[in-house]
């Protein structure tokens, strides 16, 4: 088992110090029986130790700085971990690394006697003077052959068993290579054959982790802060926080340091004052609508949009008395009419640009001016555009929403949603978000941070591939129609050129055939995955009539413009010639 040394203790990594660094020494009950046994009451804690905490750590090596070990004196809470240790090392085929750990365990621990509270005394060690860290047998218990918990590569496989109501407490710290603390404890075998490993509690919990705010690190990458809550050093600090004299997230649902880094990156990309991240794009959209459109209010949206967004607007918002006017993305007159007709109650104009799946574009600058004149807000879902291809806020929108799952994450491995805009509006959304939940996991935030580092490279490749393939598809005899803002045939092509820097990596098109012929084309493709997403490094294809609207009849699907032969293709970062050859061979197959 490879271990590394840390010769220095960073000043910022300090535990809270206590005045008394000493702890009572537990007498050893060696094999010869010369030492006086340490007696622990069956239900009481010894030396001021608190009650047991059960934990299953992944390994027995803890990298602790010298200062952390010195400052953490409360080696108080013993932890019981169910484990088994092999008595037959030759048969188990231990590697030298595994044997070294076994030897270290034996050297670090001296057996002790334990009084369980029953009349019959417990013999802690065998009379055999060769006792060297072997399992301690309770008197009268049957011999038990243990399975190895260290496999051939030195990894640890902890086998959990039922922890009985016997409190066995011991605490030892063994320094290894001057900077690693090993916490080992003696193995005890109960009469029923269960084996327990006692590990020092606070020596593994406290050192290096009571860091407080602002952990200083020289790591290149952003640390992932996995925590559900944030502590206060004293009550006065908590009161300062409650009275807004001190900053803290307090609870994991209200914020996370890793998530803040991702939010700041998106703000920088969008030119926004503030950004809030949530668990998914739909979470962001629905919380935004609930926060900004009051009960009994009215909003305006467009015909072409993500189906789940439409379902929320048409099905859930009416329960709050919220109504909606649905217009074509290019219908400026329809927007003006809706604003005039509902002058008092219109709160928000919400649409995608480009839209899903026909990639229609909304004149963001013009609709923003019209809405602002009537006191309505404008929110643009820019997921298909990405922050690189379109700056909705700079064009006049008040808010921009992204399904960060798509291009921002970019690797088809994370869910997330963002809302960016002025702090005045984001704070309103944030307050409701804190109530409803839907917080982004910090590991997901890290994945988004990682994804954004290559966003410009990926989007550049995807823009190029999609544009070239759209032109090829439009000229192919087996394709009836292509929907892509970069084509002159697109109804908003001139608008797209005006407000976009690139046209994205998604191309929608209609195959010359019915549902089954189109499905045959999709199945003949060898590179893309058939899946319901887009924007990642892997190409993805789907047939919306089946993927998103299969629960509707053909006639009902047609009301939304979803024909059986429609295909949506999200181009990844694969080689253009490979993608081209694959699509052409699939078209030849139908």
Image (spheres, rainbow, N blue to C red):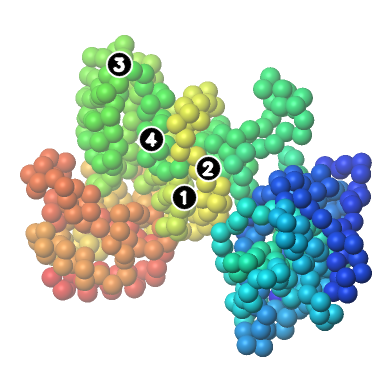
Q: CA distance from mark 2 to mark 4?
A: 16 Å
272 horizontally vs 372: left or right: right
Q: CA distance from mark 1 to mark 3?
A: 35 Å
243 horizontally vs 470: left or right: right
Which residue appears at 56% of the width and 63% of the height? 160
Which residue appears at 38% of the width and 26% of the height? 290
Mark 1 = which residue?
408
Q: CA distance from mark 3 to mark 4?
A: 19 Å
Please provide percent x and percent y for residue 575.
39, 70
Mark 3, secondary structure of its residue: loop
Picture quadrant of residue 297: top left
Mark 2 crowdedness (10 Å alpha carbons): few <14, some 14-19, many ≥20: many
Mark 1, secondary structure of its residue: loop
Residue 484 visible here: yes
Mark 2 = which residue?
266
Disc number for residue 296? 3
Please provide percent x and percent y for residue 74.
82, 47
Picture quadrant of residue 528: bottom left
Assign the C terminus to one quadrant of the image: bottom left
Mark 4 = which residue?
285
Labels 1 and 3: the sequence-earlier one: 3
Mark 3 crowdedness (10 Å alpha carbons): few <14, some 14-19, many ≥20: some
Labels 2 and 1: the sequence-earlier one: 2
Which residue appears at 66% of the width and 54% of the height? 166
Q: Nearer the viewer, mark 4 or mark 1?
A: 4
Mark 2, secondary structure of its residue: helix
**Rendered view: 166 above or below 401:** below
Labels 4 and 1: the sequence-earlier one: 4
Q: CA distance from mark 4 to mark 1?
A: 16 Å
Labels 2 and 3: the sequence-earlier one: 2
Q: Are marks 2 and 1 in contact (CB under 8 Å)?
A: yes
């Amino acid at each position: 088992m490879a271990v590394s040394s840390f010769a220095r203790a960073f000043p910022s990594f300090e535990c809270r110090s206590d005045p008394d660094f000493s702890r009572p020494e537990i007498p050893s009950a060696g094999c010869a029986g010369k030492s006086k046994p340490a007696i622990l009451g069956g239900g009481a804690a010894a030396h001021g130790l608190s009650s047991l905490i059960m934990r299953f750590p992944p390994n027995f090596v803890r990298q602790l700085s010298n200062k952390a070990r010195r400052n953490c004196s409360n080696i108080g809470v013993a932890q019981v971990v169910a484990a088994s240790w092999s008595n037959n090392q030759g048969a188990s085929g231990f590697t030298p690394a595994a044997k070294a750990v076994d030897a270290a365990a034996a050297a670090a621990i001296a057996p002790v006697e334990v009084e369980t509270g029953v009349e019959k005394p417990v013999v802690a060690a065998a009379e055999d003077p060769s006792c060297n860290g072997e399992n301690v047998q309770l008197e009268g218990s049957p011999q038990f052959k243990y399975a190895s918990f260290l496999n051939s590569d030195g990894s640890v496989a902890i086998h959990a068993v039922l922890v009985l109501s016997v409190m066995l407490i011991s605490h030892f710290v063994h320094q290894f290579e001057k900077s690693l603390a090993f916490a080992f404890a003696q193995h005890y075998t109960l009469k029923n054959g269960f084996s327990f490993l006692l590990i020092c509690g606070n020596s593994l919990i406290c050192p290096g982790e009571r860091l407080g705010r602002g952990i200083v690190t020289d790591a290149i990458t952003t640390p992932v802060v996995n925590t559900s809550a944030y502590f206060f050093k004293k009550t006065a600090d908590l009161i300062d926080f409650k009275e807004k004299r001190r900053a803290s997230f307090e609870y994991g649902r209200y914020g996370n340091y890793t998530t803040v880094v991702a939010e700041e990156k998106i703000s920088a990309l969008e030119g926004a004052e503030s950004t809030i991240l949530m668990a998914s794009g739909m979470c962001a959209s629905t919380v935004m609508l609930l926060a900004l459109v009051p009960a009994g209010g009215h909003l305006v949206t467009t015909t072409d949009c993500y189906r789940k967004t439409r379902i929320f607007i048409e099905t859930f918002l009416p329960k709050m008395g919220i109504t909606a006017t649905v217009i074509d993305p290019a219908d400026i007159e329809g927007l003006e009419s809706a604003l005039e007709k509902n002058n008092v109650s219109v709160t928000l104009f919400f649409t995608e640009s480009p839209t899903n799946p026909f990639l229609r574009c909304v004149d963001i600058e013009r609709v923003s001016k019209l809405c602002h004149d009537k006191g309505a807000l404008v929110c643009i879902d820019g997921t298909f555009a990405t922050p690189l291809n379109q700056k909705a806020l700079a064009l006049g929108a008040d808010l921009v929403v992204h399904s960060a799952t798509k291009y921002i994450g970019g690797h088809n491995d994370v869910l997330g949603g963002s809302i960016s805009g002025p702090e005045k509006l984001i704070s309103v959304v944030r307050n409701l978000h804190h109530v409803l939940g839907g917080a982004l996991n910090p590991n997901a935030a890290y994945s988004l941070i990682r994804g954004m580092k290559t966003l410009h490279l990926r989007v550049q490749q995807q823009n190029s591939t999609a544009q070239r393939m759209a032109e090829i598809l439009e000229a192919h005899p087996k394709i009836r129609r292509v929907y892509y803002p970069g084509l002159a045939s697109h109804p908003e092509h001139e608008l797209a050129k005006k407000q976009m820097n690139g046209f994205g990596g998604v191309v929608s098109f209609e195959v010359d055939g019915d549902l089954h012929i189109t499905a045959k084309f999709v199945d003949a493709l060898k590179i893309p995955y058939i899946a319901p997403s887009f924007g990642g490094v892997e190409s993805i294809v789907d047939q919306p009539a089946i993927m998103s609207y299969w629960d509707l009849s053909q006639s009902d699907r047609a009301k939304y413009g979803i024909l059986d032969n429609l295909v949506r293709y999200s181009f990844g970062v694969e080689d253009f010639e490979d993608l081209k050859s694959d699509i052409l061979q699939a078209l030849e197959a139908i």
